[in-house]
C-alpha cells in the first residue's frame, strides 16, 4: 500500500481529533442518539437522556440512505435545525450524515462532524467534497469493503486537505443472517497498525439487535477502540428507522455504567503493560 502517503501509520503518532471540547483518540468517546431525527420532541428528549447517561456527542440522521425509496428518507433541513438545537441545549457536539456532494457546504453550518455512511464509502465525489471542509469526518467502512479499500477512501479525504478523519467499523456482509451484519472486531487492531487515525465501533448497525449492543460495546473497549457510535431512541418501538437496534434511555444508561468500569480497568491495564515495556 505504497500510495498511502497520508493515511499510513509509518511511525506517526496517533492523531487526536478535536470536536469542540471533545478529543477523539484520547480516552473513550461515546456518540449516541437516534438513527433519524424525527421530531423536536423526539430529538430533544433523546438528547437530554443520552447527555444524562454520559454521552460525549449527539448523533441523528437528517438524510437517510434507505434501501427502499419508499422508506422514511429523513427530515432534511428541518432535521438539521432540530439536531443543532438539541446540541445547543445539551452542549453536545452533533454528528450527522451527508449523502450528496451538493449538500456538504450548507450541512457544515449545522454539523460538528460529517458522517459518510457505509453505502457512500467509495463515493469519491463526496469524499473529495468533505475533504475540502474544515469539519471532522466520520468515515464508516463500506459493508463490502476491504481494509485496503477503506484506507484509500481515507486517503481521498486527507489528500483533499482535511486531516481530521474518524473511522467507524459498522459490520460487514457475510453469509450470516442472524445478525444484520458481522462486526469485524479485528478491524480495530488492524487499522491501528495501518493508520494513525482513531477508530470507533458502531454496535447498532453491526448487529441490528438492541439485545446485542451492550456486549459488542464492551468488546469494542477490549479491542482497543477509541469509542462508540450507538443508536438510542426515547421510544424505540415507534422509531421511523432501525427500531430493532435502538436502545431505550434506560438500556443505554445501564450500558454506560458497565462501559465506564471496563474503560477504567482497560486504562489501568494498558498503563501496566506500558510500564512493563509491552505493547
Ligand atoms: C446510520 O448511522 O444511521 C447509518 C445509516 O449507518 P450505515 O451507513 O452504517 O448503515
Ligand atoms: Mn440507523
Image (spheres, helix red, strand yellow):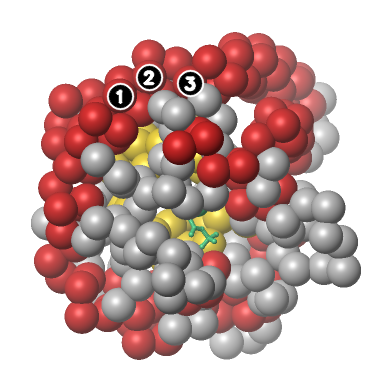
Outermost residue toward the right?
Answer: 175
Quarter of the image where the C terminus is located: top right
Mark 2–mark 3 distance (CA, rounded to whole Å): 6 Å
Q: Is label 1 in contact with label 2 (beta carbons under 8 Å)?
A: yes
Note whether 165 is above or below 266 in the view shown. Answer: below
The disc at residue 26 is none
Give the residue drawn at x 35%, y 64%.
73
Dot 3 falls on a residue whose secondary structure is helix
Q: Is label 2 in contact with label 3 (beta carbons under 8 Å)?
A: yes
**For this rendering, which residue is in front, 114 or 11?**
114
**Left or right position of 88 against 172:** left
Q: Quadrant of residue 226?
A: top right
Name the residue beneath numbered marker 1.
Answer: 45
Quarter of the image where the N terminus is located: bottom right
Which mark's residue is nearer the viewer, 1 or 2? 1
Mark 1–mark 3 distance (CA, rounded to whole Å): 10 Å
Mark 1–mark 2 distance (CA, rounded to whole Å): 6 Å
The disc at residue 249 is 3
**Image location (x, y in percent) of residue 197:** 52, 56
Local crowd size for mark 1, using a 10 Å CA cut-off: few (<14), some (14–19), many (≥20) = some
Name the residue beneath numbered marker 2.
Answer: 49
**Image location (x, y in percent) of residue 243:** 54, 43
Dot 2 falls on a residue whose secondary structure is helix
Note whether 36 is above or below 270 in the view shown. Answer: below
Amino acid at each position: 500500500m505504497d500510495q498511502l502517503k497520508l493515511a499510513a501509520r509509518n511511525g506517526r503518532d496517533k492523531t487526536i481529533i478535536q470536536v469542540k471540547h471533545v478529543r477523539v483518540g484520547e480516552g473513550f468517546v461515546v456518540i449516541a442518539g437516534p438513527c433519524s431525527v424525527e421530531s423536536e420532541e423526539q430529538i430533544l428528549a433523546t438528547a437530554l437522556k443520552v447527555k444524562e447517561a454520559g454521552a460525549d456527542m449527539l448523533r441523528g440522521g437528517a438524510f437517510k440512505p434507505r434501501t427502499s425509496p419508499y422508506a422514511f428518507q429523513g427530515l432534511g433541513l428541518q432535521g438539521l435545525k432540530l439536531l443543532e438545537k438539541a446540541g445547543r441545549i445539551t452542549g453536545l457536539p452533533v454528528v450527522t450524515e451527508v449523502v450528496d456532494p451538493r449538500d456538504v457546504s450548507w450541512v457544515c453550518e449545522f454539523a460538528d462532524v460529517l458522517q459518510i455512511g457505509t453505502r457512500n464509502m467509495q463515493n469519491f465525489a463526496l469524499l473529495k467534497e468533505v475533504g475540502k471542509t474544515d469539519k471532522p469526518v466520520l468515515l464508516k467502512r463500506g459493508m463490502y469493503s476491504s481494509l485496503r479499500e477503506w484506507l484509500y477512501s481515507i486517503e481521498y479525504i486527507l489528500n483533499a486537505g482535511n486531516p481530521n478523519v474518524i473511522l467507524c467499523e459498522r459490520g460487514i456482509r457475510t453469509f450470516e443472517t442472524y445478525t444484520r451484519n458481522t462486526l469485524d472486531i479485528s478491524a480495530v487492531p488492524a487499522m491501528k497498525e495501518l493508520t494513525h487515525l482513531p477508530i470507533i465501533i458502531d454496535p447498532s448497525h453491526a448487529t441490528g439487535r438492541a439485545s446485542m449492543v451492550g456486549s459488542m460495546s464492551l468488546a469494542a473497549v477490549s479491542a482497543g477502540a477509541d469509542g462508540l457510535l450507538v443508536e438510542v431512541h426515547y421510544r424505540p418501538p415507534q422509531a421511523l428507522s432501525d427500531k430493532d437496534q435502538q436502545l431505550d434511555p434506560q438500556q443505554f444508561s445501564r450500558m454506560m455504567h458497565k462501559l465506564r468500569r471496563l474503560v477504567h480497568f482497560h486504562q489501568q491495564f494498558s498503563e501496566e503493560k506500558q510500564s512493563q515495556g509491552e505493547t
